[in-house]
Image (tube, rainbow, N blue to C red):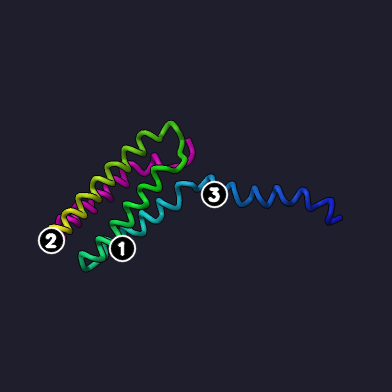
Amino acid sequence: MLKTVRPLLLPLLLGAFTLPALAGDLEQPMKKIGFNYKQAVKADDPATMEKFITQMKDEVEKAKGREMPTAKKAKFLEGLDEVQTELDASLAALKSGDQEKARAHLAKVNDLKKEYHKYAKQKG
């Protein structure tokens, strides 16, 4: 019986592992961006903030290369570009010693998330 069931189980198991990966292609970088954002906001010193902002920038780049619905892709990429601009400005502020200005740019990242997050959804 095992010999007759095995050929049927293999495709089912492979499908079970690949479908979530395809469906959540954008999910992992987005979660990491969120995690790094929270850590950057909580950071007490500029070096720690810089570390998490840099990690956010890396995840934004990864998110840009992920699959997403074609109808939403242009708008979503526009949002990611704006996020990247704010992250660059935040890093520049940190390098010039202005931690408050860096935090203001991080707050803008949160506003952009609210505005563009709907375009990251996989459906539609």
Q: Nearer the viewer, residue 24 or 3?
A: 3
Q: Secondary structure at mark 2?
A: loop
Q: Tags 2 and 3 in contact by the CB under 8 Å rule?
A: no
User: Amino acid under label 1?
Assistant: Gln
Q: Amino acid at mark 3?
A: Ala
Front residue of this view, candidates 110 and 84:
84
State yes or no: residue 77 in magenta.
Answer: no
Measuring from the top left, give residue 18's x and y in whole percent: 59, 48
**Quarter placement of the N terminus:** bottom right
**Separation of residues labelled 1 and 2 (CA atoms):** 19 Å
Q: Amino acid at mark 2?
A: Gly
Main SS of residues in magenta:
helix
Dot label at residue 97: 2
Q: CA distance from mark 2 to mark 3?
A: 41 Å
Q: Which mark is residue 21?
A: 3
Sequence-earlier tag: 2 or 3: 3
The quarter of the picture where residue 64 lies is top left
Number of numbered discs visible in the structure rendering: 3
Foreground disc of the pair 2, 3: 2
Number of residues whose C-alpha sits closer than 10 Å to that of mark 1, classed few (under 14), some (14–19) or many (20 or more) = some
Residue at 35 percent across and 35 percent down: it is 75
The label shown at residue 39 is 1
Check the image and report above or below for 73 versus 106: above
Q: In this rendering, would 29 be left or right of 96?
A: right
* Mark earlier in primary sequence (1, 2): 1
Q: Residue at x 33, y 54 (%)?
A: 56
Rendering coords of residue 60 (x, y %): 35, 48
Q: Residues within 10 Å of mark 2 (few under 14, many from 20)?
A: few
Q: Earlier in the sequence, mark 3 or mark 1?
A: 3
Which residue is found at the position 31% from the left and 41% from the top?
Answer: 79
